[in-house]
Amino acid sequence: ECFGCASTIARYAAEGASVSLVTMTRGGAGLWNGRGAGDLRRLSDVRELELRDAAADLGVRFLEVLDYPDGGLEKVEEVDAVRERCIGDIVRCLRLHRPQVVVCFGPEGAYGHPDHKVVSRLTVQACTLSGDPAAFELEGLALGLLPWSPSKLYFQTATVTTVESLKLPTQPPITTRISVGGFQQAKLRAFSHHRTQTQEWEPLRKFVEAQADVEVFSLVGAAPGLTEDDLFVGVDL
């Protein structure tokens, strides 16, 4: 959330939007301040607490932390039954929270992370299926959840300056620029809760500097030449 659109989250939350955040893993396969984690279960527990503190600081109203294997989502995608369960979990979240706008990683996985690429693909599928009454029908009935189709789906993306500065892979085309000048410090403050990832502080600071006062997004299925300055343009509020 902090390396992505945290400033946008903080801005919309401050303006009264209800923001829900879903993460697919608990981060247990990562490094502990640049060193091997050792006890992955303990790191997962700590990372989840850090995430909850950061999300609360940003104004996230609902946080759901799923427990798929960190660093192993490609294997999840390869097994039909597990992939179906994972998509079903995302569909459940969509039907439960009923977001008008969904933001996820782009196909390139932000900086090329394999897990992020999988999350992008599965989220796109889930956004299509969540509005289909026949998809995951029994699960929906059991939980009392009705079909729901988000109005808009966005990929996180990056400016040319950011791509060049941080040597990122090719990003989705920018359609939407959100002014976040008053909320970049909220992003950095939220990241300060991720105490097991202090090795990422400097890259994040460079990322914020490169993005300047905007965070950028790519509307999936946008008409050529579309430009926006608000994620909720065209959404019936």
Image (spheres, rainbow, N blue to C red):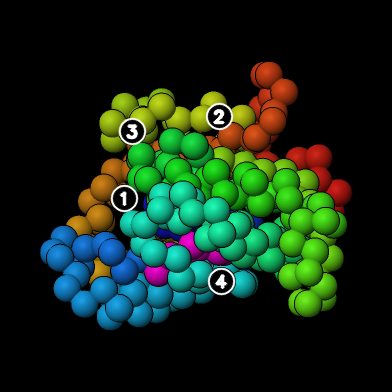
Quadrant including the C terminus: bottom right
Residue bearing mark 4: 64
The numbered mark, 2 or 1, whose residue comes first in the sequence reads 2
The mark lying in front, picked from 1 and 3, is 3
User: Which residue range is magenta in the image?
Assistant: 21-26
Q: Are marks 4 and 1 in contact (CB under 8 Å)?
A: no
Residue 89 visible to the viewer: yes
Instruction: Check disc 1 and report its element: helix, strand or loop.
Output: helix
Q: Residue at x 28, y 64 (%)?
A: 29
* First reached walking from the N terminus: tag 4 or tag 1: 4
Residue 80, compared with residue 219, is above or below; it is: below
Q: Secondary structure at mark 4?
A: strand
Residue 79 in picture, x, y percent from top left: 49, 54
* Closer to the eye: label 4 or 2: 4
Which structural element holds mark 2? loop
Q: Residues within 10 Å of mark 1 (few under 14, many from 20)?
A: some
The disc label shown at residue 43, or none:
none
User: Which residue does the image show at 84% across and 65% down from the upper left?
Assistant: 146
28 or 1: nearer the viewer: 28
Q: What residue is disc 2 on? A: 174
Q: Residue 118 in the image: x percent, y percent?
A: 47, 47
Question: Along the horizontal axis of the image, is 231 left or right of 6?
Answer: right
Q: Residue furthest left?
A: 35
In primary-sequence order, the first of circles 4 and 2 is 4
Q: Nearer the viewer, mark 4 or mark 3?
A: 4
Q: Residue furthest front?
A: 80
Q: Quadrant of residue 95?
A: bottom right
N-terminal of the two: label 2 or label 3?
A: 3
Contact, mark 2 vs mark 1 (Cβ under 8 Å): no
Element type at mark 3: loop
How far is disc 4 from disc 3 in space, using C-alphas?
28 Å
Q: Is residue 8 left or right of residue 206?
A: right
